[in-house]
Every structure is written in structure tokens, then in C-alpha cells.
Image (tube, grey):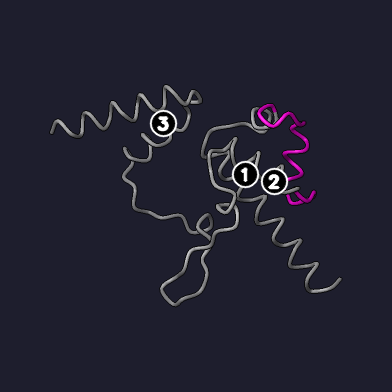
Amino acid sequence: MSLAIKTLLMESDEVGKRIREYRRRRNLSQIKLAEKLNISFQQVQKYEKGKTDIPLSRLVSIAKALDVQVNDFFKKEKSVDGGAVDVFENPPDFLAREESELLHCYRKIENKKIRESVLNFLKSLSDSF
């Protein structure tokens, strides 16, 4: 197997891991994500495990369903020494427990209008103090 093919396969695995991580962060099951995409949950499993290549059009649909940008599936952060660091392998440890819980609850709200209302409410609270 050529180096280029191995690199592409590795990239599919990494993209799949990121899809799984974003899905979990939004508290979506594979079944719920599959329903949003009109595909089987088994296909979502294949994407997440890197067993099946993901067409660009499907990747765009997945990004929309998870409320992320397509390039978020490929991002690596720079470390202090200049090397790339996978943000999911080394998640930032800067959120307090309450902040993390708030974010977790917010992401569970599926209705975008309700999410927007909650955000506006929180903004109004923070402006009043």
C-alpha cells in the first residue's frame, strides 16, 4: 500500500473520530444523527470507525447536523513547540464544572430557536450584573 493511500486511510479514521466526538458532545445517538442524515445508523458507525470513506456532500450534511464547520473535522491545534496537537486527545482543561455542565445542557437543546432564546436570556442576565 502506498504512503498516499495509508495517509488517506489514516485521515478517514481521524475524521471519523472527530465526528463521533462532536456527536457525543451534542448528546446525539448514532440513531438520531442517522435520522437527521436520512441514512442508517450502521452507516454512521462505519463513518465513525473510518471503515467507509465519506463523500464531501455527506461530510457537509454531517457538519450541518452537528452544528460545526467542515474544517473542524480536520483541525489540529499548535502545541508550544510548534507541533500539531489533536484537540480531542488533549482537551483543554479550562472549564469549571459548572461551565462544562452548562455547555452540556445547552448542547442538548435541539430546537435552534429555544437555544437562541436561552443564549439571549443568559446574555441579558450577564449584562444586568
Amino acid type assigned to the residue bearing label 3 in the image: Tyr
Q: Position of residue 76 (x, y in %)?
A: 53, 62
Q: Relative to 8, does residue 106 appear above or below in the rendering?
A: above
Which label's residue is closer to the chain start, 2 or 3? 2
| Residue in front for this viewpoint, 70 or 110 | 70
Q: Which residue is mark 1?
A: 20
Q: Quadrant of residue 118?
A: top left
Determine whether label 2 and label 1 are within 8 Å by CB.
yes
Q: Which residue is mark 3?
A: 106
The residue that appears at 62% across and 44% down in the rendered structure is 20
Q: Estimate the spatial distance between the alpha carbons at disc 3 and disc 1, rounded to whole Å.
A: 19 Å
Which label's residue is closer to the chain start, 3 or 1? 1
**In the drawing, does residue 95 fall left or right of residue 104?**
left
Q: Which residue is mark 2?
A: 48
**Is disc 2 placed on a helix, strand or loop?**
helix
Name the quarter where the C terminus is drawn: top left
- Over which residues does the magenta segment extend? 35-54
The residue that appears at 78% across and 67% down in the rendered structure is 6
Amino acid type assigned to the residue bearing label 2 in the image: Glu
Amino acid type assigned to the residue bearing label 1 in the image: Arg
Determine whether label 2 and label 3 are within 8 Å by CB.
no
